Image: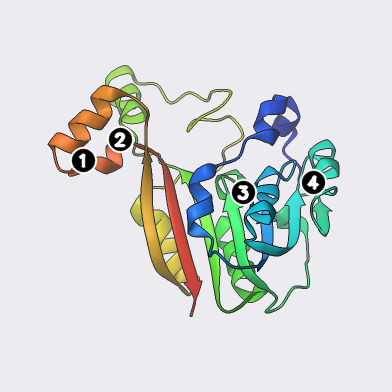
């Protein structure tokens, strides 16, 4: 079922490019599936860099999908969890940029992605980090677990992950983890404390997790 909360998003939500994902995509002309492709700005950057030869997308919000169609070879409009896409052993890279947290059963979608990839193909993901310290400060000391318009507690999020739980999902769906990392929140104090503690508490300062998994 389509999540109507997507319709309330501002235009910037669909034009944002997560630059952190770009270094995780091999520098070669890949066949790429971009799930949650929005208006296609990520794919556009991949084409400009020569890192995509064919682009496909899935997007639930039709106005954004129509913009992406100007850039991508094909864009499927609708809910990825309700689609049956026949792409066995086809893609070099499947990108899930801030999309899996919106799904009811993300592990089923990740399993399907595995079948779409060629041997040695890659899944590249970004997801919010629910261990970010502000989330737990509000829960433990203020008794608050409240949804917001955007961010980690975005009201369209249905699932929450930590580094270990997301890693476990990828491994259980047969991916070999090649990379995992964190995007540290902007803030001089947080970055300074993270450096002073040699990254020991890094997961508590990361607002987003980045993963790359390879098809075995």
Tag 4 secondary structure = helix
Q: Do the CB atoms of the residues marked 2 and 3 lie less than 8 Å apart?
A: no
N-term mark: 4 or 1: 4
Q: Name the residue under label 3.
A: 103
Tag 2 secondary structure = helix
Image position of 17 with respect to 55: above or below: above
Q: Do the CB atoms of the residues marked 1 and 2 lie less than 8 Å apart?
A: yes
Q: Where is residue 203 in the image (x, y as percent from the top left)?
A: 29, 43
Q: Position of residue 20 (x, y in %)?
A: 48, 46
Is residue 9 among the parts visible in the rendering?
no
Q: Single out the residue that lies furthest toward the front.
A: 49
Residue lying at 72% horizontally and 55% vertically, measured from the top left: 80
N-term mark: 3 or 1: 3
Measure the alpha-carbon separation of dots 2 and 3: 25 Å
Image position of 160 with respect to 192: above or below: below
Q: Name the residue under label 2.
A: 205
């Amino acid at each position: 079922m389509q999540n109507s909360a997507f319709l309330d998003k501002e235009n910037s939500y669909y034009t944002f490019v997560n630059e952190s994902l770009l270094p995780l995509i091999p520098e070669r002309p890949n066949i790429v599936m971009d799930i949650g492709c929005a208006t296609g700005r990520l794919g556009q950057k991949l084409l400009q860099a020569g890192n995509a030869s064919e682009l496909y997308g899935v997007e639930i919000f039709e106005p954004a999908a129509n913009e992406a169609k100007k850039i991508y070879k094909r864009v499927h409009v609708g809910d990825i969890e309700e689609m049956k896409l026949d792409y066995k052993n086809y893609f070099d890279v499947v990108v899930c940029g801030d999309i899996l947290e919106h799904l009811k059963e993300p592990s089923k979608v990740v399993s399907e992605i595995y079948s779409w990839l060629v041997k040695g193909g890659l899944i590249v993901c970004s997801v919010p980090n629910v261990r970010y310290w502000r989330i737990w400060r509000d829960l433990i000391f203020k008794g608050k677990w409240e949804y917001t318009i955007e961010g980690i507690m975005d009201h369209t999020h249905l699932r929450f992950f930590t580094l270990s739980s997301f890693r476990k999902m990828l491994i259980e769906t047969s991916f070999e983890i090649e990379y995992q990392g964190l995007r540290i929140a902007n803030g001089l104090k947080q970055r300074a404390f993270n450096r002073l503690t040699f990254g020991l508490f890094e997961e508590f300062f990361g607002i987003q997790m980045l993963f790359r998994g390879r098809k075995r």
